[in-house]
Amino acid sequence: MKTIAVIDIGKTNAKVVLVDGGDFREVAARTMPNGVADATPYPHFDTEKLWTFILESLAVLSRERPVDAISVTTHGATAALVGEDGELVLPVLDYEHDGPQALAEAYGTIRPRFEDSGTPVLPVGLNAGLQVYWQSKTFPDAFGKVRWLLMYAQYWSFRLTGVAASEVTSLGCHADLWEPRNGRFSSLVEKEGWTRLMPPVRKAGDVLGSVRPDIAAATGLRPDVPVHCGIHDSNASLLPYVLTRAAPYAVVSTGTWVVVMAMGARSVLLDEARDTLVNVNALGEPVPSARFMGGRAFSTLGGRSGDLPASAVGEVFRRGAMLLPSLPQESGPFPGRRATWTVPREELSEEAAQAVIAFHLALMTATCLDLIGADGPVIVEGPFAANRAFLMMLKVATGRAVLAGGSATGTSIGAACLAAGRAPEPALVSVDGDLPEGAADYAARWRRLAAEG
């Protein structure tokens, strides 16, 4: 294996990345913002714009370096309804659209138990099962034309190959469609008659087929380039560790969402009201998980990564400046809570405000780790791995070793592992040094105030 093209569709950005299958370096990439079309019949992802970007990127990048395989990774909470002709019968719903909530009460009478599906009740359209239920009842004529119910990563591999597949990391991503501990479709799928719409379950690394001839012609790819089934993005970040590291440990995958996954976790009772859930890793194993929209909060707040002067951290500790949960307030371990600054942001220096933002995100992450019984070292992947203030406070709050991943796009490397059939030993950097005196007291006070509400 020489070069793997990874199609990486995140909620905020879409990428096509070339990964060297020998040393797992990212050797080239193209990126575009992934917006939402606010149009009829509901806000949806602009799949045709994404498709054009994917084809153009494959054409441009393959001229730089011939592509030997294609792998796909995407965000979760997204399903595509495809007809007999291979076209969408309805647009791919944006999971932040609140339309499905109109049927939440009726859906609540048929959804699987949390104990079975590992899926908590989530706001807007974050339960893919609710999305599909709402689409089936709101647009019955269109839904009657559905041949395949595809999760999002498998939608793109289907467009590349014409082969439909189901896959457990996406089915098990708070979708209500899978039973993680039993390894089968949920009762919802059977009750609603969707079993006939579900393609055969394939492993994330399975080759579905070669690129379609028309795609090979349009992009200049060889017609025998294999396309792998694909994987949910947080599980792509987890995969190199699953394949190379002994439990216990936890992986914090950061992007639009901060997703915390615990391998070898202590046995705890998950609290579905606090956005805990059970994910399914690429090997089909259940993984206790929790999440919050940390990347969205970081962007909304104007967060910046990088080192902060000791004076800024000292100012924060001296004044007890904190950002209490939650932002956004709809999800995470403190749902429904409005974010508050204990000291008005405008009264802080900009450096101190950046420290408060980083500490808030670290303490939210530590809360998620506690809720799922995480044990062992904490590995941070993605953009927050470059935020030293975040890493340092996470180390204080957990009392455990914190390791920073070496790649800013852990999802792409993880997806490349599917095509390479192996994983590199992740390059990790231990977070050394300590915050100034008072950090532990700060973390304890944040937790106390957060718990009090």
Image: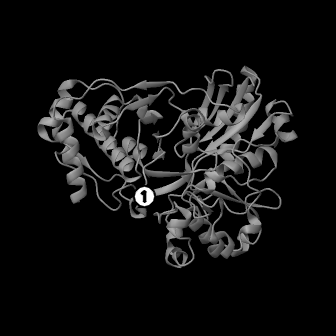
Question: In the figure, residue 358 lies in which quadrant?
Answer: top left
Q: Position of residue 430 (x, y in %)?
A: 39, 25
Indicate left or right for 391 with 290 as reference. left
Q: Position of residue 421 (x, y in %)?
A: 71, 33
Indicate left or right for 341 with 318 as reference. right
Using the image as rendered, state which of residue 229 and residue 95 is in the foreground. 229
At 68% from the left and 52% from the top, the residue drawn is 167
Residue denoted by label 1: 275
Q: Residues within 10 Å of mark 1 (few under 14, many from 20)?
A: many
> Compared with residue 169, is residue 52 higher up or lower down, i.e. above or below?
above
Image quadrant for the N terminus?
Answer: top right
Indicate left or right for 249 with 367 as reference. right
Question: In the figure, residue 177 lies in which quadrant?
Answer: bottom right
> Compared with residue 354, is residue 187 higher up or lower down, i.e. above or below?
below
Instruction: Tell me which amino acid carries mark 1.
Output: Asp
At 59% from the left and 38% from the top, the residue drawn is 239
> Compared with residue 278, is residue 55 higher up or lower down, i.e. above or below?
above
Using the image as rendered, state which of residue 21 and residue 150 is in the foreground. 21
